[in-house]
Image (spheres, rainbow, N blue to C red):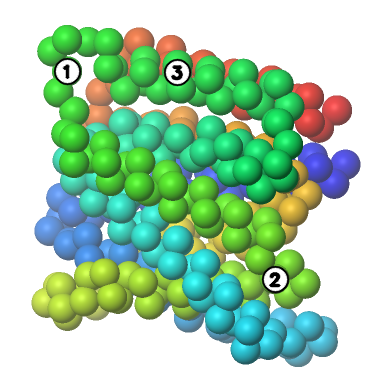
Amino acid sequence: MSKLRGALFVGFGAASYGILATIVKYANNQDAHTSILTFYQSLTGVIVLFILMQFAKTKQTPVKASLKSKSKLILFGISMGLTSCFYYIAIQTISVSIGIILLMQSIWMSVVWEMIQTQKMAHWLKIVGSFCVLGGTVLATNLMEEDVHISMEGIIYGLLAALSYTVSMHASNHIETQLSSVVRSFWLIVGSLLTVTVYWNIQIWEHWDWVIFLQFGIILGLFGTVIPPILFNIGIPQTGLGLAGILAAIEIPVSICSAQLILRETVTGIQWLGVGIIIATVVVINARKTN
């Protein structure tokens, strides 16, 4: 039952991430720069999580975070900030539909990470599932079509985002788990905010706009830095990193459907077949793990 509950938390967290790229690309089309969108996302997260952390203190006596714990969480929060930066840069040159497929390479990256960490071979179903995801990726990105041109820059940034995303899930599973999910999320997002600030630096000031913050920053912050980390911090310790990485594929249909509805992106039948293969992998492995 705990694994099923954890799977639901991870699934909803992944679905929350699914709408982010569409919002960012829509905002870009409204002349909102990626630097300020990324900054506002992390800033909103820090503000909301700080409020939640203060509220939680009045309800219970949580384990106090030491300076070492805070520093470690901030350090791993770098991966969260880099995920946002790399992912949002990637979708400037590739479609959201392809961008999300590249981000979901974290599925097999998570399985590899788990094998390296435990020094044990992963369950055969996870390994087969990882290869199925790779096969589905070839179809979902339309790589088989000769006349399809995909930006190499977009691919590189998309894969970098996937690697950073894998590290973020590792942090949710192993780093300072004795602390409450809100406290852990707060310090992780502090690390994310610092990373985004350093990455974009002067461009943040050049594109500062409170209207954009109200239009897009708050919703990006809630769905990108508040809801998912809390749900991941609760769910991933119950599911394990490998399964969590596979469950993260739920983000794919949410992202693609939102891009179709809002951005009017076109997804071919072959691409949907690739997505179907990835989702089928999620269903099969999730069914085994929750029984």
Badge number at residue 148: 1
Kind of residue sitting beneath label 2? Glu
Disc 2 to disc 1, C-alpha distance: 45 Å
Mark 3, Cα crowd under 10 Å, few <14 / some 14-19 / many 20+, is: many
Residue nearest the viewer, comparing 30 with 271? 271
Query: Residue 140 placed where, x, y %?
Result: 37, 20
For disc 2, the marked residue is 176
Q: Is residue 201 placed above or below 111 in the rendered structure?
A: below
Q: Tell which of 58 and 155 is nearer to you.
A: 155
Residue 52 drawn above or below residue 151: below
**Amino acid beneath label 1:** Val
**Sequence order check, earlier mark of 2 and 3:** 3
> Residue 27: x percent and y percent?
23, 55
Q: Quick one: label 3 or label 1, which is nearer the N terminus? A: 3
**Residue depicted at 42% across the width and 44% down the height:** 162
Q: Is 118 located above or below residue 234 in the figure?
A: above
Identify which residue is drawn at 56% across, 25% down. 130
Mark 3 residue type:
Gly
Neighbours of disc 1 within 10 Å: few (<14), some (14-19), many (20+): few
Residue 184 position, x and y percent, is 63, 72
- Tell me how far mark 3 sits from mark 1, CA to CA: 17 Å
* Label 3 sits on residue: 136
